[in-house]
Image (cartoon, grey):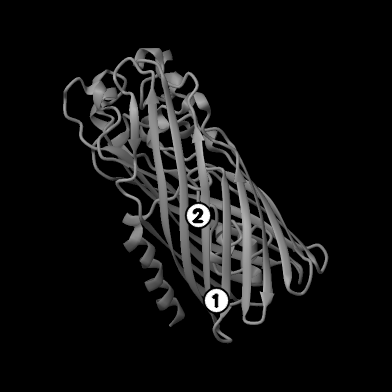
Amino acid sequence: MKLKALARASILPLVLLPGMALATSGYFSHGYGVKSMGMAGVGIALPQDGLAAATNPAGTAFVGNRLDLGLTWFRPSRGSEIEGNAFGLNGSYDANDSQNFFIPELGYAQQLSPQLAVGVAVYGNGGMNTNYGTSPFTPLAQGAWIGRGGVDLSQLFISPSLAWKINENHALGVALNLAYQRFKIEGVQPFAWAGYSESPADFSNNGYDSSYGWGIRIGYTGNITPELTLGATWASKTYMTEFDKYRGLFAEQGDFDIPSTFGVGLAWKATNELTIAGDYQRILYSQVAAIGNPIGNLFTGNLFGSNNGPGFGWENANVWKIGAAYAMGDWTLRGGYEYIDQPIPQDQTFLNIYAPGVVKHHLSLGATWRVSKTGELSMQYTHAFKETVNGSNSIPPMLGGGEANLWMYQDSLSVAYGWKF
C-alpha cells in the first residue's frame, strides 16, 4: 500500500516539470526540503525530513518513517543592459515575460531496522529561465526576423538512498542521483548565421530537448557529542546524455553534465529548544565545459559545439549557510542566511544575458506547525537580494565591443506537509 502511494506521488514532479526554473546558488537550488529552505538551505548535519538525502543521504538514518510533499512558488526578476556597442545592441532589456514557476518535491524515508534505512527524494536540482519579449541580439540579424529571446533549463533528480547506522550516533549513506533535464533557447540565431557554430542547424530555436543521466552522492552524519553533530557529503558529476538539438551550441557536441559538489556541516543543540547549524558547500561549475569555458575560446578557433567551444564562463563557487531553529510547543520557528561567491566574472557577462544567475545574498524564514502526532505543516519564505554585475571587457571587439551588465533578485514561498508513520 505504501509503495503504491509512493509510486503515484513520484509522478507528481514529472507532471509539473514544465513550470520549473531555479537560479539561487548559481543555477542550483539553495536548499531541498521546506524545513531546510527555511534555514537558508542548511542540512548537511541537520536532517529534518524525508528529503534529507537530497543534501546528505546519511541523514535518512535519523528522520524516522515519514513522507513529505511540498510545493514552492518561485518568482525571479532578471534583466540586462548593453552599452557602448558598435553594432546597435545598446539598451535595457527586461527578461521577465515569464515570472512565476512552481517546483514540487517529495521525500520518503523508511527505517527497515535499527541499523538500516531507505528512502527516495524527488526534487528540482536547478535551472535557469529568461524570457525576453524581443531578443537582445536582434540588431545582429541585420533586418532578419529572430523573434523572442531566452532560455529555459530545468533539472529533476530522483534519488533513491540507503543509510547504515554504524552505531547509535554515526551513519553512512549513499544515494543514486537519476537525473532528467530539458532545455530550449531562442533568439541567438545571428551567431550561427555568422559562422560561429560547428553545427548551425543545431544552435537555436529548435524547441525543447531532453537528456538523462546519473551520478552518486555519499555522506556521513555523526553525533560527536550529545550537543554537536558533524556532517559531510560529496556528489559526483552527473553524467548526462547530449542535447542533440543543441549540439552546435554547447561545447563537446551538446554535452551538458551537472557539476560535482562537496560540503561539510555542523549542527549545535545550544538548548533543548534552540539548534544552530551551518554548512559550507563548493560547486564545481568549471568542470563542465558548456558552463565553465569562457567566451574567448570562440576567438581562438573553437566554434560553438566543438570540444573546446565557448561556454558561459562560470567559475567554481563557495556557498556559506547559517541557520537556526527554535522549538516552542507545537511550533518550530526557523531562519537563515546564505552567501554564494559570484560565479559569473565581469568579463563573461555577454552570453550570461541569457543566464544571469548573479544573486549572492539570501535571507530565509520558516516555520513548522505540528498539527497532530503524525502530521505537520511547514512553510518558508526566501528573498535573494538584488545583485548587479557590470561587465568589464565583456563584449569582444569583433562583436562590436562595449559592456553587458546583468541584474537579478528573487522571491520564493513554499509549503509542505509531512506524515509520520
Examine the rendered structure and indicate whether residue 91 appears above or below residue 368.
above
Which numbered circle lies on residue 66? 1
The three-letter amino acid code for the residue at tag 1 is: Arg
Residue depicted at 61% across the width and 50% down the height = 338
* x, y percent for residue 365: 58, 62
Examine the rendered structure and indicate whether residue 284 appears above or below residue 115.
above
Label 1 Cα crowd, 10 Å radius (few <14 / some 14-19 / many 20+):
many
Q: In the image, is 152 to the left or to the right of 49?
A: left
Which numbered circle lies on residue 177? 2
* x, y percent for residue 16: 34, 61
Residue depicted at 51% across the width and 40% down the height = 387
Would you identify the image quadrant in which residue 273 lies?
A: bottom right
Q: Nearer the viewer, residue 348 or 291?
A: 348
Q: How many marks?
A: 2
Q: Nearer the viewer, residue 30 or 213?
A: 30
Which of discs 2 and 1 lies nearer the camera? The answer is 1
Residue 124 visible in the current orientation: no
Labelled pair 2, 1 in contact (Cβ < 8 Å) = no
Among all residues in the image, which is located at the extreme right?
Answer: 225
Residue 172 visible in the current orientation: yes
Mark pair 2, 1: CA separation: 20 Å
Examine the rendered structure and indicate whether residue 130 appears above or below residue 309.
below
Task: Indicate the quadrant containing the N terminus: top left, top right, bottom left or bottom right.
Answer: bottom left
Question: In terms of secondary structure, where does tag 1 sit?
Answer: strand
Residue depicted at 79% across the width and 66% down the height = 270
